[in-house]
Image: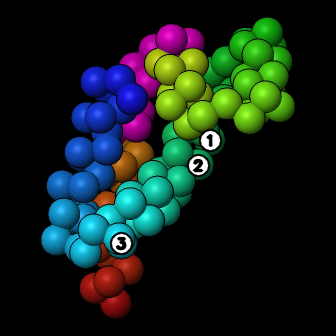
Amino acid sequence: MNKAQQDIRENIITMFNIAELPEDKQEETINRIGGIIFQSVLMRVLPMLSEEELADYEKLLDNNVSPDELMNYFGEKVPNFLQIVAEESENFRAEAAETFKK
């Protein structure tokens, strides 16, 4: 996991108070929230890729690369990728907070 990915992980932990959960639930919760956020990020970044980059992305998926490798790929191909991740993390936090208010 590179520095940017570690920063994203720590941001999720802080944003959702995950550190307060029992250790066995922390990783599960991080993975669930991260997966939801990643889906939102994909919706924004996939249209930014060229046909060739989309083909490369599909090859990565076919080869079952790790989430870290996918993050690295998008970090290289998408300008402001980390900013998009931060925005989608905040959007999810705000939506979750609104849901819990109801």
Q: From the viewer's perspective, is residue 61 above or below residue 15?
A: above
Q: CA distance from mark 3 to mark 2?
A: 21 Å
Q: Which residue is mark 3?
A: 25
Horizontally, is 53 left or right of 101 in the view? right
C-alpha distance separating marks 2 and 1: 6 Å
What predominant SS class does the magenta segment belong to? helix
Mark 3 or 2, closer to the camera:
3
Q: Nearer the viewer, mark 3 or mark 1?
A: 3
Residue shown at 36% from the left, 49% from the top: 89
The answer to whether the residue labelled 3 contacts the one labelled 1, judged by CB atoms less than 8 Å apart, is: no
Disc 2 marks which residue?
39
Range of the magenta residues?
76-86
Disc 2 to disc 1: CB gap under 8 Å: yes
Q: Is residue 59 found left or right of 37 in the rendered image? A: right
In primary-sequence order, the first of circles 3 and 1 is 3
Who's the residue at 50% across and 31% down the image?
68
Residue located beneath label 1 in the image: 43
